[in-house]
Image (cartoon, grey):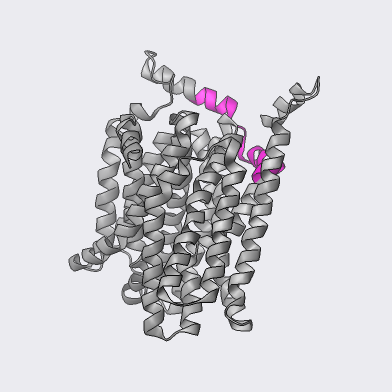
Amino acid sequence: MKNFLTMVRGLPFAMKVLLASAAARSLSSFAILAYMPIYLYDTVGMDGATIGYVIGGSVLVGTLAGVYGGYLADRFRKIDLVIALDIAIILFNLSLTVFHDPVAVTVILLMTNVASWSMGVAGSALLSELVPAENRVKVFSLRYSLQNIGAAVGPFLGIAALTLGSGGPFFLSVIVIGASLVPLVIFRQRFLPAGTGTTTPAGETEQSAEKQDEEETPKFRDVLKVMGADRRLTYFTIGGILSIVVYGPLLTFMSQYLVLVEDRDTAYKLVAYISAANAITVIGAQYALGSRLKQDNLLKWLTVGIGAFVIGLVAMSLSTNAAVIVAAVVVFSLGEVVLVPAEFTFIDSIAPDNLRGSYFGAQNLIHIGIALGPILCGFLLQHFVPAAMFYVLIAVVIASWWFYVIGCRATKAHSAPAPAGAEAVKAGNQG
């Protein structure tokens, strides 16, 4: 804890503002997310199936759009993109208090998710751009801890905001994001990378930066070709999709499982225990473990994380006793604590400087796994004995570990000294 507080106190002002903004966005997002199904049912008049399609489809579209959002982060000043996306999210949330037509609401939710997922990518790229390489993992782990605190507090504040009426959670979101946006706008110059805040006249600086960006950043089609040819990115993205199938929808698949093997009251109680155990473990252990990750020990920690998933899943399959379930979830959650910063560390280490946002955008595709997890588990629970779900998930997460292994091996091969005369080719491929 002492090291944690020392780390926070030692951060530059700009980093503290970015971290506070990330926590604020997480809080506002989860305040709305918890209320959204109720809003769509009561206020908009959608049925249960339609609600599932709209929410799931919006997340999927937003995830895919995040790839282009990463490209935009490379094309424009990242802080300007972050500010623009914050303003867009504020306007979309405000519009949900005015428009209640199902089609209009669906379009607004799609656009909100596009802006939100692009924001996540742009925020990671901005963080990576401003923080020295040796501190990036620690700062990212701190950000993830703060985001989880926002996720834990957000639903309670969202429910409390309902006292203001059906639009209460949306107004809460607007206020929280708006408050976090103010310092980003006022101190915008502090979020520019070193070398852009010189004494050059403002107009000339902007023109010079735009010209440099235009020269350094290829077209989107060319960026896709570069990323598609990077085996390291491909392997880690596949590994990320498979692993997040397992840890992303934890509450969902445990709910699916528990309602089959326990009575509903017991199932609801156990889900509450699981939620609390997961949140407390992630928040409490994220910085302590995540800050220990380095590029040279990445595979070791990935193996530890996958091992934690396996142990946790085995324990969950053996008993529904509350103490056993909580202990299993704590061990399982340690895997999440390791994997999230590990993936950031890997992508940050392989991304070319002029394509950093695009690489984080490609990594964002792993969230497709969150949509696939409940589908896979629902199929298994319907056609096989309930415990079979856990063993298939174990197989999936071990498969993800293998893709991480070959991704790390490909990185070592990529970093090995090139034969004489090959440097030009290598430089061309990286560009």
- How many numbered dots are placed on residues in this image? 0
Q: Toward the viewer: 4 or 81? A: 4
Q: Is-magenta flag for residue 218?
A: yes
The structure residue drawn at horizontal position 58% and vertical position 71%, both measured from the top left corner, is 390
Q: In the rendering, at what x and y percent does residue 58 appear?
A: 48, 62
Q: Nearer the viewer, residue 116 or 422?
A: 422
Q: Quadrant of the N terminus?
A: top left
Secondary structure predominantly adopted by residues drawn in magenta: helix
Seen from this angle, which residue lies furthest bottom? Answer: 263
- Image-based side of 349 in relation to 140, left or right: right
Q: Which residues are magenta?
A: 210-233
- Foreground: 9 or 70? 9
Task: Give left or right: position of 350 versus 105.
Answer: right
Looking at the picture, how far across and down is residue 87, in whole percent?
Answer: 34, 45
Q: Is residue 251 above or below residue 211?
A: below
Residue 333: image location, x then y, percent: 47, 58
Visible in this render: residue 388?
yes
Residue 71 at least partly seen? no
Left or right of 353 in this view: 258:
left
- Residue lying at the far left of the rendered structure: 164
Residue located farthest toward the top when viewing the structure as drawn: 199
Residues 124 and 298: in front is 298
Task: Pinpoint residue 224: horizontal percent, then vertical percent.
Answer: 65, 42
Q: Quadrant of the C terminus?
A: top right
Q: Residue at x 38, y 59 (%)?
A: 279
Is residue 383 inside the magenta stretch?
A: no
Residue shown at the point (63%, 38%) measured from the top left: 223
Q: Residue at x 43, y 22 (%)?
A: 194
Is residue 35 positioned above or below 387 on the image?
above
